[in-house]
Amino acid sequence: MSESSRSLIVGASVEQAINRQRRQYWRLPDLENMNRIIRQDLEPNNPQSIVTFSWTGFSPITGSDWRHFTGEYRLIQDDQGILFQVCKNIAVERVPAPVAK
């Protein structure tokens, strides 16, 4: 995570934020969709293999401060076979909390 992403982090240091797991702050349906798209549509280490994805998340510390993020995602695989997701943030906006159904 870059220092330029610091303004997107609510109530945590960059170090704390990089240790979070997405299920702690992503809306679950968005996370499930993203995982499916990554498996189906992205090819590791191909700079042309990019997907634009939007998701909604919140501060895991407060359970509020909902935001809608849009980013361009791609996969990088290292020499040991470990996959990393790289994201270029495109947009972020504050949104109301979703209404429970």
Image: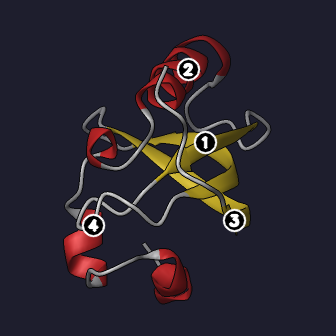
Q: Secondary structure at mark 3?
A: strand
Q: Secondary structure at mark 4?
A: loop
Which residue is tagged 2? 33
Amino acid bearing label 1: Trp
Q: Quadrant of residue 99?
A: top right
Between the C-alphas of marks 4 and 2, the distance is 24 Å
* Residue 57 image offset from top left, x and y in percent: 48, 50
Between the C-alphas of marks 1 and 4, the distance is 18 Å
Ranked by sequence position, the earlier of labels 3 and 2 is 2
Amino acid bearing label 3: Val
| Side of 82 where 3 appears, left or right | right
Ranked by sequence position, the earlier of labels 1 and 2 is 2
**Pointers 3 and 2 in contact (C-beta within 8 Å):** no
Amino acid bearing label 2: Asn
Q: Quadrant of residue 60?
A: bottom left
Q: Secondary structure at mark 2?
A: helix
Ranked by sequence position, the earlier of labels 4 and 3 is 4
